[in-house]
Image (spheres, rainbow, N blue to C red):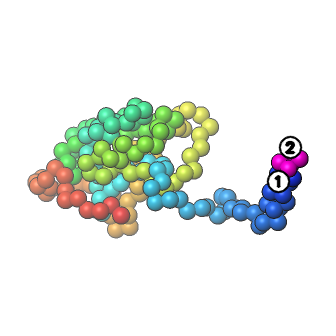
Amino acid sequence: MFTEILRGLRTTFKMMLEKPVTVQYPEVKRPVRRRFKGRHELRRYDNGLERCIGCSLCAAACPADAIFVESAENTDEERYSPGERYASTYEINMLRCIFCGYCEDACPTQAIVLGDNYELSFTDRRQAIYGKEMLLVPVKEGGLPTPQKTEPGKFNRSIPEMNNPD
């Protein structure tokens, strides 16, 4: 019994002499691992169109039933995505989400991505429901605003050629 006490004191004194590892959060943020699954993002194509085509495969793949997608038809006057449809409503309940990444795997256009943002805080339940406005990545410099006007027949495929999103 006495040797265990001495061994514990030795460990305590040894740790007192080491320099502490302190990160001055939030001024300094630690980098996350490559496979980290953080806050969701809805990506866009380089021309500003949304990648999400409203297929609801992400909602079907979600084991926690945290995603709600409602789709609508694109028109020639207002085009949100290159396909025939787009997600008019896209909501993720972050209180239900388990950050498994199944939605990211199920998406055929790589529209939903789990990013590296880990700063999620809510003061009430309504703030925990992220709508499409909060999830969409802003339009890049030089990209077209959404919605954009297009000529009929401009897109000859429902889903454009896939490019690496990064």
Q: Which tag is nearer the camera, tag 1 or tag 2?
A: 2
Location of the N terminus by quadrant is top right
Marks 1 and 2, how far apart at CA: 10 Å
Question: Where does the magenta region start and end?
Answer: 1-5
In the image, taking residue 21 as reference, residue 147 lies left or right, namely: left
| Residues packed near mark 2 inside 10 Å, few (<14), some (14 to 19) or many (20 plus) | few
* Amino acid, disc 1: Arg
Residue 135 point in image, percent of width and height: 43, 48
SS under mark 1 = helix
In the image, taking residue 109 as reference, residue 122 lies left or right, namely: right
Residue beneath label 1, please? 7
Sequence-earlier tag: 1 or 2: 2
Location of the C terminus by quadrant is bottom left
Residue beneath label 2, please? 1
Q: Residue at x 43, y 50 (%)?
A: 114
* Amino acid, disc 2: Met
Q: In the depicted view, which residue is nearer to us: 55 or 29?
A: 29
